[in-house]
Image: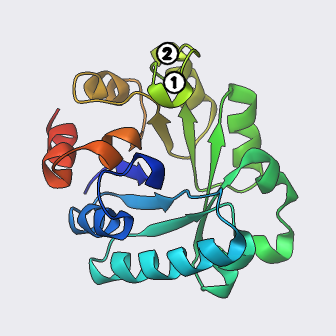
Amino acid sequence: MSDILCVTNRKLCREGFLSRIEKIAAAHPAAIILREKDLTPDQYGELAGRALALCEKYQTPCILHSFVNISIQLKCKSIHLPLPALRALSKEDKVLFRCIGASCHSVDEAMEAQRLGCSYILAGHIFDTDCKRGLPGRGLDFLETVCDSVSIPVYAIGGIQADNVAEVRERKAAGVCVMSGIMGCENVREFLLELEGA
């Protein structure tokens, strides 16, 4: 069972975006988070419908991101939210999801996300990454402190590579989350196998 979550960013993709999603789904990570939050609701809804179908084809979980109403319309039971959106999620909408994730950048945020009913959190960014250029990573001690502060799974995000993933797992993380690596690599399956075997 993979412990790797793959977050999409079509702007980093080196081929057709849906082709890349299919390759990721076929490689069976723990899940794909469809993060294209700069799209309009209509654009996201169209893309999400196609991505969900591809993920279903390979029995790979797909987690939609930010667009709660689109997720409900598509009957997707998994959503990932920035913390402000999680705070605003109504009780009526919350019960429609089996899996809710949130991105957290402090221990207090992690504890709040757990109180608000999250199934898992992403904690980061752990290492320096081009996605957060100029902002130093929060480090492994931060990750371990977050993991100790909550009882739900914590996935490390930010600068995750084969040469540091073992350190991340040693700090009690449930797994890792990758974006630029999975979007830009030449061979998706080899990239994931390298992370899993590291």
Colour scheme of the picture:
rainbow
Name the quadrant of the C terminus.
top left
**Residue 109's image quarter?**
top right
Mark 1 Cα within 10 Å, few/some/many (few <14, many 20+)? many
Q: In the figure, is residue 117 to the left or right of 159? A: right
**Residue 51's image quarter?**
bottom left
Question: Which amino acid, mark 1?
Answer: Leu
Badge number at residue 94:
none
Where disc 1 sits, the SS reads helix
Where disc 2 sits, the SS reads helix
* Residue 138 x/y as whole percent: 55, 17
Q: Residue at x 45, y 20 (%)?
A: 127
| Nearer to the camera, 61 or 19 | 19
Q: Residue at x 15, y 50 (%)?
A: 187
Can residue 19 be seen at all in this image of the molecule? Answer: yes
Badge number at residue 143:
1
**CA gap, disc 2 to disc 1?**
7 Å
Is residue 194 placed above or below 165 in the rendered structure?
below
* Residue 71 x/y as whole percent: 64, 76
Q: In the figure, is residue 127 to the left or right of 36? A: left
Can residue 98 be seen at all in this image of the molecule? Answer: no
Q: Residue at x 62, y 74 (%)?
A: 43
* Residue 161 x/y as whole percent: 29, 29
Name the quadrant of the N terminus.
bottom left
Badge number at residue 139:
2
| Nearer to the camera, 26 or 102 | 26
**Residue 80's image quarter?**
bottom right
* Residue 169 x/y as whole percent: 33, 30
Mark 2 Cα within 10 Å, few/some/many (few <14, many 20+)? some
In the rendered structure, are the residues bearing label 2 and label 1 in contact, judged by CB atoms less than 8 Å apart? yes
Q: In the figure, is residue 53 to the left or right of 29? A: right
